[in-house]
Amino acid sequence: MKLDKVRWGIIGCGDVTEVKSGPAFKKINHSELVAVMRRSGELAEDYAKRHGVPKWYDNADELINDPEVNAIYIATPPGPHKEYTIKAAKAGKLVYVEKPMARNYAECQEMIAACEEAGVPLYVAYYRRAQERFLKIKELLEDGAIGEVRFVSSTQYQKASEDVWDPQHLPWRVQPELAGGGLFFDLASHTLDLLDFLLGPITSVQGLASNQAGYYSAEDIVTGTYKFESGIHGVGNWCFTAFEDVDLNEIVGSEGKISFSTFGNEPIVLTTAGGTEQWSFERPQHVHQPLVETIVADLTTGGSQCPSTGVSGARTNWVMGEMVRNYY
């Protein structure tokens, strides 16, 4: 698929589209945001007026079938991702879908098949793959800065947020029927996708998921071990009801290690026998923009620059599914 201009329509113009993604579509050359949709027409109209978007809808089918829209950004919770992706593909529109790609690996496979059958690209919003901060880590690994990579460890835990204390008004992120699981699916997906980007596909997984605090029915702690196709080992622990917030990844090699956070903006630290080096990066104003730029480049030049596709996004869903298999 090659386009002169990518004309976006957003399904689900909620919080993630206010700053993280929405404005980027208008700031990139050969890209424009022409329509938005939200189930509340009043909120969709408000978003359109505030962001200078010419059209708004309260019905997803109407946006998908708008002849001026040739690209669909699905910014809803994972529950309807499959439905909207298949509808967009059948309408001949390329798809950019929020992460996690779907509620489970089987849904991801259906989405991939629908887009392949329709001949349209499928991209997933794992935007960290295109940010300078994480490209620097990939560069260090490819340059052999830590020798041969042996293993990676991820430790991510946080305090329980107040919005899970009321079981009658739980956020969608802890409702498995909408999210696929609990906060593990929403947050750990970023880290697991990054590891796929940095170290290659994970091909073997063992996991253990539990609910310790009882705030909701979804898992609130997950521990896993995994092996990458390359032979690298990995271990991760995610807990969402701990006493403080910690976010640390360490990639350890034969000659050093790289330490970094997934969500923070602390410096990347390289430690070797020669000492330590650090690199700091300014966080992009619109965190999706570097990745969306690669998508637009793909579509307008006919290249393949985008590093986050349906195939890579599905791998992350598979890993997460294996890690919580005992719980569900």
Image (cartoon, helix red, strand yellow):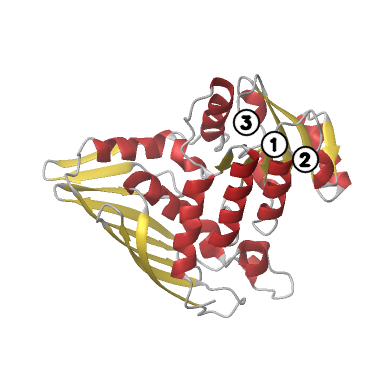
Q: Residue furthest right?
A: 42
Q: Are marks 3 and 1 in contact (CB under 8 Å)?
A: no
In the image, is 122 to the left or to the right of 170?
A: left
Identity, as a three-letter code, of the amino acid under mark 2: Ile
Image position, residue 242 (x, y; %): 46, 71
Helix, strand or loop status at disc 1: loop
| Number of numbered markers | 3
How far apart marks 3 and 2 lie (CA) works out to 20 Å
Q: Circle 3 is placed at which residue position?
A: 24
Q: Are marks 3 and 2 in contact (CB under 8 Å)?
A: no
Image position, residue 192 (x, y; %): 42, 55
Q: Residues within 10 Å of mark 1 (few under 14, many from 20)?
A: many
Q: Are marks 1 and 2 in contact (CB under 8 Å)?
A: yes
Mark 1 and mark 2 lie on one chain; the one further toward the N terminus is: 2
Mark 3 and mark 2 lie on one chain; the one further toward the N terminus is: 3
Nearest to the eye among marks 3 and 2: give it.
Answer: 2
Choose top left, top right, bottom left or bottom right for residue 180.
bottom right
Residue 93 badge: 1
**Does 247 appear above or below 146?**
below
Q: Residues within 10 Å of mark 3 (few under 14, many from 20)?
A: many
Q: Residue at x 47, y 58 (%)?
A: 188
* Residue 121 appears in view: yes
How far apart marks 1 and 2 lie (CA) works out to 8 Å
Mark 3 and mark 1 lie on one chain; the one further toward the N terminus is: 3
Residue 317 badge: none
Image position, residue 128 (x, y; %): 47, 42
* Quarter of the image with the C terminus in it: bottom right
Q: Circle 2 is placed at which residue position?
A: 64
